[in-house]
Amino acid sequence: MGHLSMRNARTGKKNQNKNQSLTYYFEIKRCKKCPLRNRCYKSGAKSKTYSITIKPDIHQKAIDYQKADEFKHKKKQRYKIEAKNAELKQSHGFQTCKFTGLFGMKIQAYLTAMVVNSKRMIKLI
């Protein structure tokens, strides 16, 4: 209803994996008289707060990117890639690496991709 908060404070720890939030504290006297009290005020409450999550810059950039047209276009094409990944994992044993080390994983990836691509070429012929 346009009333100013009594105070505000940051809650949550800095430099943790959880986001901090900005919490606003309001007077209950005003909430009891407010015509919109049935929406947010619970009878018997001792305080009224409103919290807004503070998102780090990298999270905000990701949110903005997800709203962009480029992301929406890529998202529409993703099902094709996911179908190929599912085929690699389910039909060709790409769930777990059969070899040790990064080099062995690369070899397995190349060979598995080559098999799937050759199957596709045979189907096209």
Image (cartoon, rainbow, N blue to C red):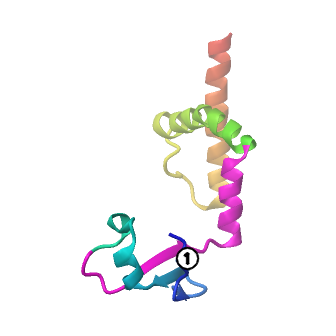
Residue matched to label 1? 19
Identity of the residue drawn at 51% across and 86% down: 11
Q: Is residue 110 left or right of residue 27?
A: right
Q: Is residue 4 left or right of residue 40?
A: right
Q: Residues within 10 Å of mark 1 (few under 14, many from 20)?
A: some
Quarter of the picture containing the C terminus is: top right
**Magenta-drawn segment:** 43-68
Q: Is residue 97 left or right of residue 117?
A: left
Identity of the residue drawn at 67% across and 33% down: 114
Identity of the residue drawn at 73% across and 41% down: 69
| Helix, strand or loop for disc 1 | loop
x, y (%) of residue 45?
29, 81
x, y (%) of residue 76?
63, 34
Residue closer to the observer: 14 or 104: 14
Identify whether 103 is placed above or below 94: below
x, y (%) of residue 110?
68, 42
Residue at the outermost top position: 125
Residue closer to the observer: 56 or 35: 35
x, y (%) of residue 2?
55, 72
> Is 69 contained in the magenta span?
no
Q: Is residue 78 left or right of residue 90?
A: right
Identify whether 48 is placed above or below 104: below
The amino acid type, in three-letter code, at marker 1 is Asn
Residue 32: quarter of image: bottom left
